[in-house]
Image (spheres, grey):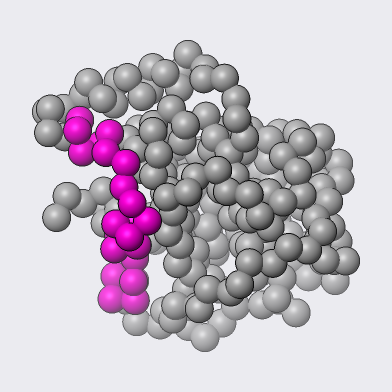
């Protein structure tokens, strides 16, 4: 059951993180976006402000050659629309059940890849989104605040109850313009799975890497470097 738990965990949390709700821009988000646009050379500022198409995002995802031996890309599964209920976390409940299954994605420009490692249940998932800096900042910030604001809660998806525990982690401040990170523990059927999620916004690009903590730490910098490469 461990592999199934891991898959469910990555699917639910990735969708939760990928569904930014509408909110008023905060002064902090505006400051970040403005500072990013003004920093560096004009060409660099233009690059960071450019909104990329899904096709362009796809080419910037890590692949097996980037990750090294032992990694196998998983085929994308059709979207599922099981009834999802969040219990014990009002902030997440307000996002709606569709958020937990990816039913309503606010960012239309996106690309995703998931890999297994070493033939085991260890997985790493990479998502890329592109939109204006303010929209990305407001959306991902609200989602992370909601998830880390509830130390424990439950997600009921397709008849399965998953006990959740969240812990805010220090984010790698040297990467990108804004950073978020958390550790999530999923427990069901007497088994637990730990998933680390780190999100980096660099200009108009948002990177989310999720999975085994060791794999996330190992490949986060590489993922950001490829996602933000100009050639």
**Relative to the observer, which residue lies in front, 123 or 169?**
123
Q: Left of 104 or right of it: where is 159?
A: right
Task: Give yes or no for residue 62 being in the magenta stretch.
Answer: yes
Magenta part, dominant SS: helix
Q: Is residue 56 above or below residue 34?
A: below
Q: Is residue 141 above or below residue 153?
A: above
**Relative to the observer, which residue lies in front, 80 or 71?**
80
**Residue under the image location 34 percent in, 38 percent down:** 204
Determine the image quadrant of residue 91: top right
**Residue under the image location 51 percent in, 20 percent down:** 25
**Relative to the observer, which residue lies in front, 83 or 12?**
83
Q: Left of 48 or right of it: where is 128?
A: right
Q: Residue 103: image x %, image y %?
A: 66, 55
- Whether residue 75 is visible here, answered yes or no, is yes
Q: Left of 26 or right of it: where is 80?
A: right
What range is drawn magenta here? 45-67
**Residue under the image location 31 percent in, 47 percent down:** 52
């Amino acid at each position: 059951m461990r592999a199934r738990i891991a898959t469910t965990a990555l699917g639910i949390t990735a969708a939760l993180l990928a569904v930014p709700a509408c909110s008023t821009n905060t002064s902090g988000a505006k400051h970040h976006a403005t500072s990013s646009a003004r920093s560096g050379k004009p060409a660099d500022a233009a690059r960071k402000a450019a909104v990329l198409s899904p096709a362009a995002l796809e080419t910037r995802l890590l692949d097996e050659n980037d990750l090294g031996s032992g990694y196998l890309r998983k085929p994308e599964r059709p979207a599922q629309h099981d009834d999802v209920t969040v219990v014990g976390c009002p902030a997440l409940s307000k996002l709606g059940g569709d958020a937990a299954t990816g039913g309503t994605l606010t960012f239309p420009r996106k690309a995703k890849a998931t890999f297994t490692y070493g033939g085991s249940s260890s997985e790493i998932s990479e998502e890329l989104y592109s939109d204006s800096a303010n929209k990305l900042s407001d959306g991902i910030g609200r989602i992370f605040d909601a998830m880390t604001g509830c130390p424990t809660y439950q997600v009921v998806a397709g008849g399965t109850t998953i006990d959740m525990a969240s812990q805010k982690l220090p984010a790698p401040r040297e990467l990108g313009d804004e950073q978020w990170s958390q550790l999530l523990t999923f427990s069901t059927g007497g088994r637990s799975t730990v998933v680390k999620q780190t999100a980096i916004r660099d200009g108009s690009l948002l990177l989310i890497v999720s999975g085994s903590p060791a794999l996330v730490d190992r490949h986060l910098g590489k993922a950001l470097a490829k996602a933000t490469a100009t050639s």
